[in-house]
Structures are given as C-alpha cells and as structure tokens.
Image: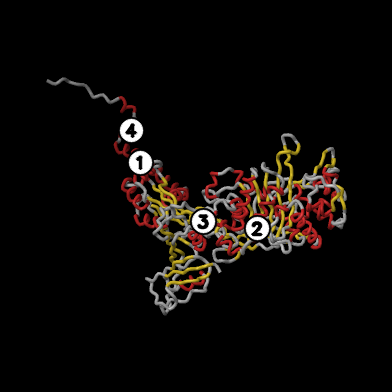
C-alpha cells in the first residue's frame, strides 16, 4: 500500500548556510545584540542630553515654566516754578487674555463685562483676533483692576502701565516736550532730562502652569523699580498763558505764518516763558503737523533787522565813546546808495543826533556810524553778546545762528550787519542779548530747570545763575538803557508803551531772503520787538517775533503792540492775585471732557484740587498723602453732578491721639492742617488752597471716625 521512497534530500539553502544560523539559540544572540545596541544608543543620547546639552534644554524648560516680568518705573513729574504739574505719569491697567486657555469664552466675557461695564459680545469679538494673546481693554482704573483680580480667571492677565499726561495740553508743549505711546521721551525737557526722569525698571520672576496661571518664584527675589526724579522748572504757567494768548492774537490778526515769544529774568537767566504759535497737544501729538513740534524760539533762525542795532549802539558808546546827543549824522533824506543798492529809511531824515539815529531806527544813520567800526571789533562785540553760538540753554536742538568771521567779510559786511542783515539769530539769542543790557552788561546763561528732586525730596541737581561774560561795562549798559527807553518814548517803539511803566526796547523789521529770486523779498518780512521793564530795575526781558505777517509788517505794527499787552498783563497786579482771578487761567483747556470724570490718578493732590476747583466740582480726600493713587468714580466715567469725586492718597499708619477733640486749624496752611489731621485718620473735605479760613466742625468739638471734616481755604 505504501510507495517506497528514497532517502530525504537536504534543503539546498541549509546545505549552503553557515552552521551558526542553524542553531536557534544563536538567533537569539543576534536579536539580543541588536536590542543592546539600540539601548546603548538611547543611553548615549540621554547622557548627551543630560550632560552635554543640559544647559540648553534647561533654558528651554525654564522659558516655559518661568516668566520674567518687567516692572515699569514711574516717570518723574515736571512742574512749573509754583508747583503746578506740567507733565505726570498716570497709573492705569490693561486687560489681556490668552484665548487658547479660556474654558468658556462667553462666560469669561460676561464676568469681565460686568466689571468693565462693557457688552460681553464686544469682548468675545476682541478675543477672536489672536489665539495666543489679545488685549480687551486699556486705561482701567485701580478700583476695577482690583475687582478683576478677585475673579481669578484662568488665562486673564492684568498689566500695570504708565501713560504720560500733560494737564495744560498745548501750553508750553514745545518746551516741555512729549513722550510717545511707550513713554519714550521725544523732545523738550522730556528728552533733555530723560536720564533723570525715566527711572530704572525692575523685574520679577513668576512660575507659570499649563493654564497660564502665574505664581511668585521665591527663589528669585523681586527687583523693584526705581521711579524717576522730578523736575522743578523756572516756567511760570501764568506768564506762559499770557505769552501764548497775545502771540496767537498777533499771528492771527496780522495773518502771519507763525510767531515766537521769549520771557526771561535778566537777573538770573531764568526762562519764565517760551511760546510758539501754532503749537501742538502732546497728549495727542499724532494729530498735529511735525513742524508744530519745533521750539522755534530756539531752533529757527531769521535775519533780525533793527533789533540787532544794539551791537552798533554798544560800540558807539563803549569803543568810540561818542557823545550820543551831540554827534550828528546826515541821513541823506531817506535814501542812500550802498554797494550798487539803495538803502532807504522809513522816513526822510536829514540830520539826526547819534541818539536820534537809534531812537528813530535810521538804517542810513547806523550804516554811516558803522564806518567807524573795525571789522574784528564789531565781530567781537556781536560774539560777546552771544550771537553766532548757542546760548547753552538746557533744551535739545538749539541753533547756533550765523555770524561770519571778519576774514570772510566783504567791504560792506559790517555796514549791513550793523542794521541786522548778513546775520541769522534765534529769538532766544536776541532776548539773552537784551538781558545783558538790562542787568548791567552781564551775559547770563538761560536755563529752564531749577532743580531735579528725587522721590525722597533730595535735590540731585540744581542750576544756579551763571554769568558767561561781562559784555559791556555797567556804565555803558546804563547809557544804552536810556537810549532804548527813548526808542519807546519818542521813537519807533511807542506802540510798546505801558501806562505808568518805563519800557526800554527796540523794534525790528527785516526783509526775508527769497531763495527763488536770490534777492530780498518786498512782500515777506519778519517783524519783532525786544525790550525790558521796568527800566529802573528790570525784572523782565521780552522778545516778540512775528514771521511773515501779511496785514502790516513793521515791527512797530505787528510786534510792539503784543509786547505792550503782555507787559501790561503780567505787571498789572500781584502775581498771587492774578493766578487765582485772572481770565488767562480760565481759558486753559481742562484735561477732560465736561461730561466725564478727568483722570487724576498719579497726580499731586494740590494740582488735582486746583483742576477740580476750576471746574467747580465737589470732591473728598481720603488719606493724608500728597499723591493720588486711586479715584472714584474711575477716570473717563460719566460725570454726575450730585456725586463727589473721592481722591485716595498715599497714607501712613499713625496712632490716634489720646484725646478726640477737634484741633484749631484756622490760620494754618492747608499742608500743615492735613499733617495735624492725619493723626485721626479721618477723611477731610477740602475747598480751596492756601490758608485755612474756616473749619467744620469748629475747634473743641468731639471727634470720631464717623465725623466729616471740611476745611475751607483761601490764598494767603
């Protein structure tokens, strides 16, 4: 039944294979060796990661786990000489979210919207723009920020920020300067003193979980920010507002391109006011033309015309020792040929005394007198008065002006320079030169910042009056003052007169050079007036310059009347009375819309009270500090006439006194009264500033924390 078979044949592959593969255990060795190599490779990689690249991967891990947060420093404030704030940092908060970490956007939006008083739909819409990070709201008050923190929502971030605020808006803007959205200085005092104002930012390290929640990392101590220092300037905002008001009137009345005005104290060199029109509002600088940012009073140059004749006048007295009343000059009946050109006077003068030449501003008379001047001597006097060089004022981008050297003069240069051509000056240079005449011959260095004060009240920098040089002798300066006084009383400057006040000064009218025709224009001019008052003891030096007026152009027409108006307004009454009652302060735009609560957080209490009084708003002060850290209602909230604005100031813990009797505060200054009341830790309502004239409750009444105290103050 079975077929007989032969011997089994061996597999051909088996016959050819090495004996090693035929054994099963050998195959296990091969497989084990393979896995051993894999394990060794993994081990080597782990060693490489853990040892060689440990630092690299540790940094990556920390970047996800640890978050370094900058703590911004508060920029120092800038105030005028009376303590009125010109620039201040306001504290506010920005609300942001990480949408990817929100469990329910709608519910989060509803919770946030309830605090912010914003429709949840708007917040949801703002969350859609960026999956990683999105801002929902800016300029959130301290009160609302605290309420948002209490919600303790995952993925919700509150950022504390500072923004620069300028309470006087356009007033003094080119001198003060401005900061951009990132609070970086961009001009004026903000830029010049930036190293003092900006402070030093701090930082803190937080641990962050997968949901974006942050927790303090105790291994890293917080580096707290150092706030910037404060500037106290020489500017008086009352004077500044008067300058700007009259300058604007002059520019508009005479249809000019622009104008500048400078007010100095000749005794010290302090800049009391520096105005330019048109200007700009640093709170919304992007809305204005870049040209309006320039402080033309120190950056823009012009040929001064007859105001420059004061250099020739100084030479006539100091170098030539002329008898100004007896020296006669023939003025060619108003027409004189010079260098193939005809020089004309505004009147057909015949013979004039040297004094009469300057009082009547005869170009021909001054040119004839200038023939006695040696070019190097004329150059030295012009240079000594500060022309052709920076005054050294503590503001950026000051122009040096143009004053050629004698080696470059033509045979007619001194003649033309003596009447204010072939030179270029800034308004500040002219004002500084006239200050040297007013103070007895000393050229003073102008300055805008009195002192720099740190957070602890220590003075870190103080500018003192600095005499640059003695330009002319006191006797020469006195004789020049008399002649410049005669210009106003008898000559071309009569429109600068102020009843009852002796004014000295000089008009200036110059044709502008037309680059298109390479000649002087007959239709474009610069009109100016420079002077000082009162002559017997000068306290003010003032220059008014009107550029390219089209409705009249003589300095006596366009600048002298503005000079008179300014002088009359700033010396008509004691400064303290004028500051409280003058309409000039009332015309300043207040820093908020009438229907909304103005932002006061970060301001000094004194300045905030002044602003509230100007708007006739009721307010309450909580705490005994001098700086407002919180307010109710929040900034930009709808204003309710029946609801007082509460100002929360920095407080300190002081134990209550042993007796609870209302002390006598009448007769104390407001600051002294608040220091006394700080012991009771009772809210005080303040009306007015200065000295306490009325108190409620009256002295001797029993006090408790429920008492409401009101102090009524008036200026001393």
Residue 258 falls left or right of residue 382: left
Question: In which quarter of the view is residue 448 placed?
Answer: bottom right
- Tell which circle, 2 or 4, labels the residue nearer the N-terminal end: 4
Secondary element under disc 4, as helix, strand or loop, is helix
> Percent position (x, y) of residue 523?
71, 39
Q: Nearer the viewer, residue 20 or 655?
A: 655
Check disc 1 and report the residue beneath it.
35
Confirm whether residue 414 shows in the render: no
Secondary element under disc 1, as helix, strand or loop, is helix
Q: CA distance from mark 3 to mark 2?
A: 36 Å
Check disc 3 and report the residue beneath it.
89
Tag 4 near tag 3, CB within 8 Å: no
Tag 4 near tag 1, CB within 8 Å: no
Of the residues tagged 4 and 3, which is closer to the observer? 3
> Percent position (x, y) of residue 476?
81, 60
Residue 269 falls left or right of residue 119: right
- Tell which circle, 4 or 3, labels the residue nearer the N-terminal end: 4
Q: Nearer the viewer, residue 347 or 22?
A: 347
Tag 2 near tag 4, CB within 8 Å: no
Q: Nearer the viewer, residue 285 or 503?
A: 503
Check disc 4 and report the residue beneath it.
19
Secondary element under disc 2, as helix, strand or loop, is helix
Instruction: Name the mark on residue 190.
Output: none
Residue, x 34% and y 46% (percent of image)? 120
Instruction: Name the mark on residue 568.
Output: 2
> Percent position (x, y) of residue 713?
50, 68
Of the residues tagged 4 and 1, which is closer to the observer? 1
- Tell which circle, 3 or 1, labels the residue nearer the N-terminal end: 1
């Amino acid at each position: 039944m079975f077929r007989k078979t032969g011997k089994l044949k061996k597999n051909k592959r088996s016959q050819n294979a090495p004996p090693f593969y035929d054994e099963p255990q050998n195959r296990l060795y091969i497989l084990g060796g393979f896995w051993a190599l894999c394990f060794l490779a993994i081990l080597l990689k782990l060693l490489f990661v853990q040892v060689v690249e440990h630092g690299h991967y540790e940094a990556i891990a920390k970047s996800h786990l640890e978050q370094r947060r900058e703590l911004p420093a508060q920029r120092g404030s800038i105030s005028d000489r009376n303590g009125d704030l010109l620039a201040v940092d306001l504290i506010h908060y920005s609300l942001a979210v990480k949408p990817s970490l929100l469990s329910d956007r709608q519910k989060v939006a509803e919770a946030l919207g309830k605090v912010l008083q914003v429709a949840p739909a708007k917040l949801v819409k703002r969350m859609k723009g960026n999956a990683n990070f999105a801002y929902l709201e800016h300029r959130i008050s301290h009160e609302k920020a605290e309420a948002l923190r209490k919600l303790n929502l995952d993925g919700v971030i509150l950022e504390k920020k500072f923004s620069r605020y300028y309470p006087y808006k356009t007033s003094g803007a080119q001198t003060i300067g401005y900061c951009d959205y990132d609070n970086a200085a961009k001009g004026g005092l903000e830029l010049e003193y930036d190293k003092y104002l900006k402070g030093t930012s701090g930082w803190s390290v937080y641990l962050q979980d997968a949901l974006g929640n942050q927790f303090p990392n105790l291994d890293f101590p917080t580096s707290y920010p150092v706030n910037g220092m404060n500037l106290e300037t020489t500017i008086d905002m009352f004077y500044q507002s008067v300058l700007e008001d009259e300058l604007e009137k002059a520019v508009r009345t005479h249809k000019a391109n622009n104008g500048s005005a400078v007010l100095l104290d000749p005794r010290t060199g302090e800049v009391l006011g520096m105005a330019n029109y048109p200007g700009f509002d640093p709170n919304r600088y992007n809305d204005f033309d870049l040209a309006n940012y320039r402080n033309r009073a120190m950056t823009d140059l012009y040929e001064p015309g007859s105001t420059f004749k004061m250099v020739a006048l100084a030479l006539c007295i100091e170098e030539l020792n002329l008898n100004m009343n007896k020296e006669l000059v023939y003025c060619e009946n108003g027409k004189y040929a010079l260098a193939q050109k005809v020089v004309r006077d505004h009147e057909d003068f015949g013979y004039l005394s040297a004094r009469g030449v300057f009082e009547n501003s005869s170009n021909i008379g001054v040119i004839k007198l200038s023939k006695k001047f040696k070019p190097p001597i004329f150059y030295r006097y012009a240079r000594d008065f500060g022309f052709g060089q920076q005054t050294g004022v503590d503001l950026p981008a000051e122009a040096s002006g143009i004053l050629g050297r004698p080696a470059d003069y033509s045979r007619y240069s001194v003649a033309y320079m003596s009447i204010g051509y072939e030179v270029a000056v800034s308004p500040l240079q002219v004002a500084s030169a006239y200050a040297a005449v007013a103070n007895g011959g000393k050229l003073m260095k102008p300055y805008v910042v009195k002192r720099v004060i740190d957070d602890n009240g220590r003075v870190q920098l103080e500018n003192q009056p600095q005499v640059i040089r003695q330009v002319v002798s006191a006797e020469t300066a006195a004789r020049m003052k008399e002649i410049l006084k005669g210009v106003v009383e008898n000559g071309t400057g009569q429109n600068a007169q102020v009843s009852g006040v002796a004014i000295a000064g000089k008009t200036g009218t110059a044709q502008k050079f037309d680059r298109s025709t390479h000649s002087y224009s007959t239709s474009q001019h610069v009109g100016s007036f420079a002077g000082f008052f009162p002559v017997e003891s000068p306290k003010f030096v003032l220059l008014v310059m009107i550029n390219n007026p089209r409705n009249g152009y003589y300095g006596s027409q366009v600048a002298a009347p503005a000079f008179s108006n300014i002088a009359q307004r700033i010396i008509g009454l004691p400064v303290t009375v004028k500051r409280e009652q003058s309409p000039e302060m009332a015309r300043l735009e207040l820093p908020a819309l009438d229907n909304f609560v103005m932002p006061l957080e970060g301001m000094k209490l004194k300045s905030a009270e002044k602003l509230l009084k100007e708007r006739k708003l009721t307010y309450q002060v909580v705490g005994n500090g001098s700086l407002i850290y919180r307010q109710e209602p929040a900034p930009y909230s709808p204003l309710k006439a029946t609801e007082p604005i509460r100002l929360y100031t920095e407080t300190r813990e002081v134990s209550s006194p042993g007796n609870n009797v209302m002390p006598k505060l009448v007769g104390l200054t407001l600051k002294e009264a608040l220091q006394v009341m700080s012991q009771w830790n009772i809210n005080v309502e303040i009306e007015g500033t200065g000295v306490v004239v009325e108190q409620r409750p009256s002295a001797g009444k029993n006090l408790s924390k429920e008492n409401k105290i009101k102090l009524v103050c008036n200026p001393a």
